[in-house]
Image (tube, rainbow, N blue to C red):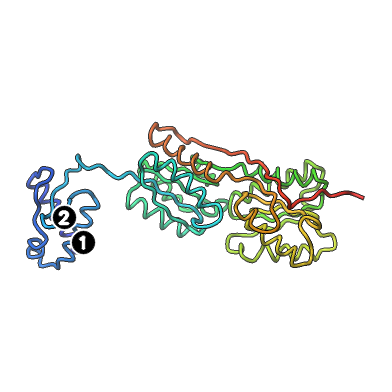
Amino acid sequence: MKKAKYKQVMDFYKEYINKNELNDGELLPSESQMAEKFDFSRDTIRRALDQLEKQGVVSRERGKGTFYKNPENFVKEKRIAVITTYLSNYIFPNIISGIEEVVSSKHYTLNLANTDNDPNKERKHLKKIMDNGVDGLIIEPTKSAVDTHNMDLYQELKEKNIPFVMLNAYYRELDPSYAIVNDYKGGYKATQYLMQLGHRNIAGVFKEDDLQGVFRLKGFKKALSDYGVDPESAEVGTYITSQISSYPYHWMDKMLSHKNRPTAVVCYNDQIAVDVVKAIIDNGLKVPDDISVVSYDDSILATATNVRLTSVRHPKEELGRHAARLLFNMLEIGVEKPRFLYNPELVVRDSCKELRRR
């Protein structure tokens, strides 16, 4: 298969440099000379030079020409890539802010991407960063509770000695470096608080295709068990990423039609809790007078409505900073698989009420 025209031009320039044993800063054949030699358009020649400039092989000065750039004298831009499931909403801007604080202090450039929790998009971004070259990667895995996705690309990262840190969750099969919240303990504390307020008929709604939801549900069930409630008797709703916009509201609406409706609900996160609270209010009930609600993440949504949510704290900026520090521990001093586990605390507000038994 014949090479693209611009790649033919790139090859010629590289052969010319090697054949003539050029020194740094020596003049190379001009665009017009190359266009005439190959009978290619000037746009094709410029495309080739653009690529060579990106690779650090040449430099160009308007009105003067194109010059050889000795790689030994070239200071490579140092880059860190960050891939999250989401980027512009909820807690993610705060996490990115924490990462950026550390990365910029190390004089690295930050490249951002998001997957929308889609393994195919994760694959696309992983390929892209390896093609473009980065020094390190911080990534929040997609659908981390499902079978490991894109294992071949993670192995390729290892083979290319590109260190990576997983954020918020991790693929267990990879046994990687990570910065995460102890979601098991967070789910336990949220449920324990309701138990201490006297609630025993407690429902829960959790995401099941991400590891965070799996662990929060386990913590929920353990707290029920520790306080003498059979975990299998509790009403539990589970949903996947594609159901996030509809499931929580409809699930809560259905729970409220039960004769023995729950007196309290533990929600996977604040985003879900907002929909749960809306369903409660739309049914003519009040939070916390009729039903108590505990949430997770302590995001801006926790205090964005009239119902100020009691919520398990996610460290956000702090977790971002820790993820970046772990990565630099790998890059700068060769630490193998550094890890950070944050033990969350409960932020108590107005969405829970003590249940007085008759």
- In the rendered image, residue 113, in percent from the top left (x then y), is placed at 43, 55
Q: Residues within 10 Å of mark 2 (few under 14, many from 20)?
A: few
Find residue 11 and name its label.
2
Residue visible at 21% across and 53% down in the picture = 53
- In the rendered image, residue 33, in percent from the top left (x then y), is placed at 7, 61
| SS of the residue under disc 1 | helix
- What's the residue type where badge 1 is placed? Arg
Q: Residues within 10 Å of mark 1 (few under 14, many from 20)?
A: some
Which mark is first along the chain, 1 or 2?
2
Contact check, label 2 and label 1, Cβ < 8 Å: no
Find residue 100 and name its label.
none
| SS of the residue under disc 2 | helix
- In the rendered image, residue 100, in percent from the top left (x then y), is placed at 44, 45
- The residue labelled by disc 1 is 47
Left of 4 or right of it: where is 151? right
Which of the image's four quarters has the N terminus?
bottom left
Number of the front mark, 2 or 1? 1
- What's the residue type where badge 2 is placed? Asp
Left of 211 or right of it: where is 157? left
Marks 2 and 1 sit apart, C-alpha to C-alpha, by 13 Å
Quarter residue 36 falls in: bottom left
- In the rendered image, residue 21, in percent from the top left (x then y), is placed at 9, 44
Quarter residue 262 falls in: bottom right
Q: In the rendered view, would you say 28 is above or below 327?
A: below
Residue visible at 17% across and 51% down in the picture = 59
Name the foreground residue: 195 vs 129. Answer: 195
Q: In the rendered view, would you say 206 is above or below 179?
A: below
Q: In the rendered view, would you say 111 is above or below 259?
A: above
Name the foreground residue: 274 vs 37. Answer: 274
